[in-house]
Amino acid sequence: MALAEQFQHLVDTPGVTPAAFALAFAAGAAHAVGPGHGKSLAAAYLVGSRGRVRDAVLMGGSVALMHTASVLVLAVAWTFLSLSDVVGLHTLTTSLQLVAGLLVVATGVWLLRRWVREWRSGHGHGHGHGHGHGHGHGHEPSSSSRPSMVLLGISGGLVPSPSAFLALATGLFLGRSGFALLLVVTFGLGMAVVLVGVGLLALAGNNAVIRGAESRAALAVASRVAPILAACGITAMGGVITTLALTSW
């Protein structure tokens, strides 16, 4: 029996398809738990930008969508455009890792400049008319931060999982592209659930720290220092990603 026929027979076996989707979801979740994919970056960004629940969902969804798209594009190019004859898989993934690292560095530098400017301004306009308004405007992420949030999510999903790539490439080669694509999408959903969960935990921890602040002065200092520290952390992690990509070339 040909390999394609064996694959078709396996897919048509009762109970195999639901199990395959369950395994794909679990594999995506496990892949997100492992090193990489911007979990630390997402947590630092959400804390530093004073994000909310929808921001955690946006970032986790961006990583999962970008990961699915990168797997799809690479698998199609590898299968139908003979990309494997032009560049090796290791070189390709290393190049993507380098691009992702540079994107993270750019996002971190942009955030650092933004928060340093805010630090220097000191919100002086808020101290001449009392404190009744509570400075609530300082804790909402601006709309201008959303593009950088999506950019950071995209950088986290730019390098595809080898297992997801292999599953889709095999499905395309054997004529079961629809089934393989659904498996990759399910893989991405597993990633998204974990990444959103990490973001929500980061926000919950940040809110707990704010509620536990002993004084308004300490809270004011912490709320202004934390974004700068988070931006420095994002820039440093981007530098590490870039360095690792360059050294493994």
Image (tube, rainbow, N blue to C red):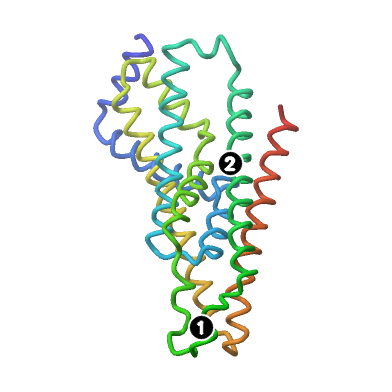
Residue 146's spot in the image, x, y percent? Answer: 44, 53
Which SS class for mark 1?
Answer: helix
Residue labelled with disc 2:
103
Q: Name the one closer to the observer, 246 or 124.
A: 124
Q: Name the one closer to the observer, 218 or 91.
A: 218
Q: For this view, does 27 lie left or right of residue 6?
A: right
Mark sitting earlier along the chain (1/2): 2
The picture quadrant where one finds residue 177 is top left
Residue 74's spot in the image, x, y percent? Answer: 47, 24
Residue labelled with disc 1:
211
Placement of 122 over or under 28, stated as above or below: below
Q: For this view, does 98 lie left or right of residue 205?
A: right
The picture quadrant where one finds residue 249 is top right
Q: Name the one closer to the observer, 91 or 120.
A: 120
Residue depicted at 35% across the width and 34% down the height: 183
The number of callouts visible is: 2
Which SS class for mark 2?
Answer: helix
The picture quadrant where one finds residue 52 is bottom left
Residue depicted at 59% across the width and 15% down the height: 87
Q: For this view, does 1 lie left or right of residue 100?
A: left
Disc 2 residue crowd, few under 14, some 14–19, many 20+, Cα 10 Å: many
Residue depicted at 56% across the width and 9% down the height: 85
Classify the position of the N terminus by image quarter.
top left
Tag 2: residue type?
Leu
Disc 1 residue crowd, few under 14, some 14–19, many 20+, Cα 10 Å: few
